[in-house]
Amino acid sequence: MDLQKIKTLIEFVGRSHISELVVSQDGTTVRISNGISRQATATEDLTVARQQPARSPVVKDAVAGEGDKGGLMVVAPVFGLLHRSPSPGAPPFVKVGNVVEAGQSLCIIEAMKVFNTVSAHKTGPILRILADDGQEVDAGQPLMEIG
C-alpha cells in the first residue's frame, strides 16, 4: 500500500463520522483511529486470508419526500461510500432516463466493508442522479429521484 493511499484514508477518517478504519491489502494492514492520541500505523500481517465481501443486504425504507421534478427521492439509508455499479469497470446500475422496476438495484453503499444494496421503491423513470460514484454520502442524503 503506497503512502498516497494511506494519506487519502487518513483524510477520509478525519472527515467522516467513524472512529476507526482497518484496511488490509497485499499483506499490509493499516489501522486509522479518529482519536486524539492515536496515529495511523502499518503492520505486516502474515496470516492475511482473502476475504469475500459479505452478501449485499437489500436496504429498505430509503425513500424521502417529493423531489424537485415531482418524483420521489431515494435517500442514503446509511453513511458510506456510494458505488453506482456492481463492480469496478462495470456499467452503472442505472442512468438518467432508465425506467426501473420496484425492487431493482439502484446503487450500493459500502459501510464498514458491508455492501448495502439500495433498491427502487417504485416503478418509474430515473429523473435525476444526485450523487457521484465513489462519493461519500450521509444517511438521509438524496441519491436519486424516480418519477
Image: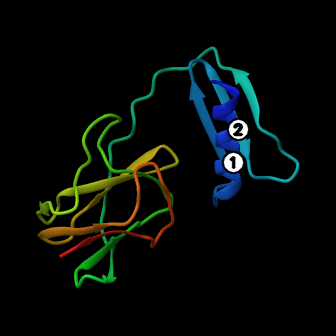
Mark 1 lies on residue: 11
- Label 1 neighbour load within 10 Å: few <14, some 14-19, many 20+: few
Which quadrant does the N terminus fall into?
Answer: top right
Q: Are marks 2 and 1 in contact (CB under 8 Å)?
A: yes
Of 65 and 21, the residue lying toward us? 65
Q: Please identify the quarter of the rendering in which residue 97 is found.
A: bottom left
Q: Amino acid at mark 1?
A: Glu
Residue 121, percent across and down? 21, 70
Residue at the far top: name it: 46
Eyeballing the image, is 22 above or below 74? above
Q: Secondary structure at mark 2?
A: helix
What residue is drawn where x is 71% and y is 54%?
14
The picture quadrant where one finds residue 19 is: bottom right
| Residue at the spot of label 2 | 7
Q: Amino acid at mark 2?
A: Lys
The residue sitting at 66% across, 25% down in the picture is 2
Q: Position of residue 91 (x, y in %)?
A: 24, 41
Q: Nearer the viewer, residue 127 or 124?
A: 127
Q: Position of residue 72 (x, y in %)?
A: 25, 79
Left or right of residue 93, residue 21 in this image? right
Q: Secondary structure beneath disc 1?
A: helix
* Above or below: residue 10 compared with residue 103: above
Q: Is residue 35 left or right of residue 27?
A: right
The label shown at residue 103 is: none
Query: Looking at the picture, how far across and down is residue 124, in whole percent?
Result: 12, 71
Q: Is residue 34 above or below residue 30?
A: below
Q: Residue at x 68, y 34 (%)?
A: 6
Seen as rendered, the residue at the extreme right is 37
Quadrant of the snapshot with the C terminus: bottom left
